[in-house]
Image (cartoon, rainbow, N blue to C red):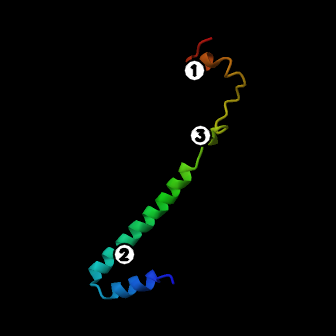
């Protein structure tokens, strides 16, 4: 049987002074934000360097042959 943490927490909070209830609420918001951020990070960790292929376009088709021309403005 899974514990109903929402009810357990609510019952416990009812017995606490208002300032302590506010602290618990702030902590719950912190945990929620941290969980949201860690989900974003884990998504980024699954990304591959190959994902950047094709994100930029120059319109030039000879870059591999004339890279000095484009990098250093030399021919």
| Res. 17 image quadrant | bottom left
- Secondary structure, mark 1, is helix
Where residue 38 appears, x then y in whole percent?
A: 47, 58
Q: Give the quarter of the figure containing the C terminus.
A: top right
Mark with earlier residue (3, 2):
2
Q: Is residue 5 left or right of residue 55?
A: left
Q: Is residue 40 left or right of residue 14?
A: right
- Residue at point 32%, 80% (across, down): 21
| Res. 12 image quadrant | bottom left
Q: Which residue is mark 3?
A: 49
Q: Which residue is mark 1?
A: 71
In three-dimensional space, the C-alpha distance between marks 3 and 2, rounded to whole angstroms, equals 40 Å
In three-dimensional space, the C-alpha distance between marks 2 and 1, rounded to whole angstroms, equals 55 Å
Residue 25 - label: 2
Q: Nearer the viewer, residue 35 or 58?
A: 35
Q: Nearer the viewer, residue 31 or 66?
A: 31
Q: Give the answer, above or below, for where 62 lies relative to 9.
A: above
- Residue at point 60%, 43% (across, down): 48
Where residue 7 appears, x then y in whole percent?
A: 44, 86
Where residue 74 appears, x then y in whole percent?
A: 59, 13
Label 3–label 1 contact, CB within 8 A: no
Where residue 41 appears, x then y in whole percent?
A: 50, 54
């Amino acid at each position: 049987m899974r514990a109903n943490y929402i009810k357990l927490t609510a019952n416990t909070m009812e017995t606490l002074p208002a300032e302590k209830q506010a602290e618990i609420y702030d902590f719950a918001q912190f945990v929620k934000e941290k969980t949201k951020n860690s989900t974003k990070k884990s998504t980024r960790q699954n990304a591959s360097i190959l994902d950047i292929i094709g994100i930029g376009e120059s319109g030039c088709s000879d870059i591999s042959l004339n890279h000095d021309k484009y990098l250093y403005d030399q021919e």
